[in-house]
Image (cartoon, rainbow, N blue to C red):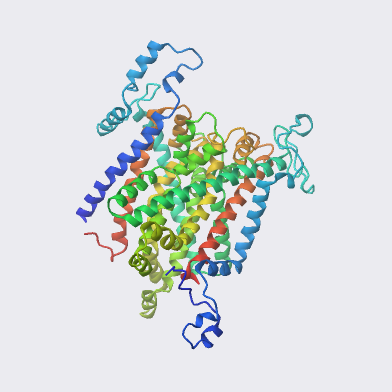
Amino acid sequence: MLNPTQAPEAGPVSAAAEAPLPGGSEITKARSLGQDAWRELRSNPIFWVSAVLLVLFLLMAAVPSLFTSTDPGHADLRNHYLGKPEWGHFFQPDWFGYNGQGQSVYARTIYGARASVIIGFCVTLGVTLVGGVIGMFAGYFGGLLDTLLSRLTDIFFGIPLLLGGMVLLQAFTHRTIWTVVLALATFGWMPLARVMRGAVITQKQADFVTAARALGAGTTRILLRHILPNTLAPVIVVATIALGGFVSTEATLSYLGIGLQSTVSWGVDISDAQNVLRDAPHVLLVPASFLSLTVLSFILLGDAVRDAFDPKLR
Amino acid sequence: MGRYVARRLLQMIPVFIGTTLLIFLMVYSLPGDPVKALFGQRASDPATVERLRHQFGLDKPLLTQYWDYITGLFRGDFGQSFTGRPVADLMADAFPVTIRLALLAFGIEIVIGVTLGVVTGLMRGKFLDRFVLVFTLIVTSIPVFVIGFVTVFLFGLKWKVITPTVQDSMDIAQLFAPAMVLGALSLAYVSRLTRTTVVENLRADYMRTALAKGLPRRRIIGVHLMRNSLIPVVTFLGTDLGTLMGGAIVTEGIFNIQGVGNTLFRAIQTSEGPTVVGIVTVLVLVYLVSSLVVDLLYAVLDPRIRYA
């Protein structure tokens, strides 16, 4: 059903009316599932809202100096200890007030985006690769390999992401962005493997796979050229929604003190701010809002992508 | 049915062994020497280190240690923590608190989540439906620790409705706010899931039949609709009880509740291997058993499913 050569009949009515000839598809070019999904996405306002927000966060992560010229590490205890926010001073250092060290909360929040965005994307890339390969092998080859790989997936499913990440990260005395990525990817690949396995099992019985095999295509070619493109849709959907979860888990680990160290990051800042919650809630609430907004954008984007890729919902 | 249960129980064995082995290897083979850590700042005496290593069995090969641990489990022996206290004792203190917290969260989640889901499903497209949909979306995207802090700040510090930290971990009234925080995420999932299945089932043929033969609305919704709509919800709820108990790490930390989450967190921080392995073993068991119970409940809720 997901075969790109069988484009869903979403074409204009004129195509059907003016196409009595065989091969009438020359009038309206056949669209692939991806193109169809893109058309669907473009008309979805939720997609645009989340996309704009995400572009904004990506910009913050890539070039924070675009938003603020204040150094996030610059501390001025004498003048700015827990300074209250000045909601009218847009893009000024005191827009969101100052923290317990006299650092600008606004500058720290802008610079904190980088860690979350890098970790979110790298972990998602990692789990998609690992889970995808495991799921593909299990689904395509079946038999003993499938049993082994599926049990392996079950085993890792028994350990929650946060718990596994904590135990693994505790072993590192010096933790950087990459150690956190490694820990989260180690315990986050299972949903992707399950989705990929299911999709491959459905696809490998399709006629075009039998046809390709009859024409003498090798296993690698069948897997990469025929099956993989048709399994991408569900994998992309699950990966996008998972991305938000990874950003959230990273912040949780940093908040617990087992995540990032000596990096400007939302999780670390929220963790530091909990002691001054009573006197200066803004120090905690500003990075927390940015963090939640990032997760929300990814969830919304994932929802929109799922609606676009699911032909049944059209 | 009996054969199915037996087969599922047998399938659980390799998963149980695999998961405990995984956590065991991670805890004991990763760098960091817990015995030297017992000495704190002082220089460690090699002879004492050797004696302690022997006492805790740390001088044996890892797989032998694991074998000793698993055989100990069957005698109900969870081993000894490095401070000398039996791990089973530690857990006997911590688990009752967390089970209360998790069950309370579970109850809140079922009552509020399912009610919201059914009501919004029946009122699809109305204002309340939109409102709940947006609300649940926001709740799902806020990390639990942020929800916790906002709750403490608003209800504990600003309006002083609740105590910011829990004084008595066994007091249900004080556990109510933490349970809300712990269950918030799942509550949002449950209400969305219930809404989806209710909307789907409203269009089913049997609903029209029930309506046509003149059944009262209460019976149509309460019996015909609910029984069919709850199947996917039960699946989610079943696996969620284990998640709630494991997820208590963050909530218990914020509200200072002396339960499993706090004990586990401290144990991970201080490399208390036996305690970490012991608690995770129990959590894995809870997870495995609850997923088995879910599968069996299927047959009860859906007469079309029969296990041979």
Residue drawn at x 22%, y 56% as measured from the top left: B1
Image-based side of B294 in relation to A11, left or right = left
Q: Where is residue B235 in the image (x, y as percent from the top left)?
A: 37, 56
Residue A187 figure quarter: top left
Q: Position of residue A280 (x, y in %)?
A: 69, 38
| Farthest left residue in view | B3
Residue drawn at x 46%, y 35% as measured from the top left: A168
Number of labels in the image equals 0
Up/down of B46 relative to A291, above or below: above
Up/down of A44 relative to A74, above or below: below
Residue B26 figure quarter: top left
Up/down of B268 relative to B173, above or below: above
Q: Position of residue A265 (x, y in %)?
A: 62, 39
Residue drawn at x 36%, y 53% as measured from the top left: A137
Quarter of the image with the N terminus of chain A is: bottom left
Q: Is residue B115 visible?
A: no
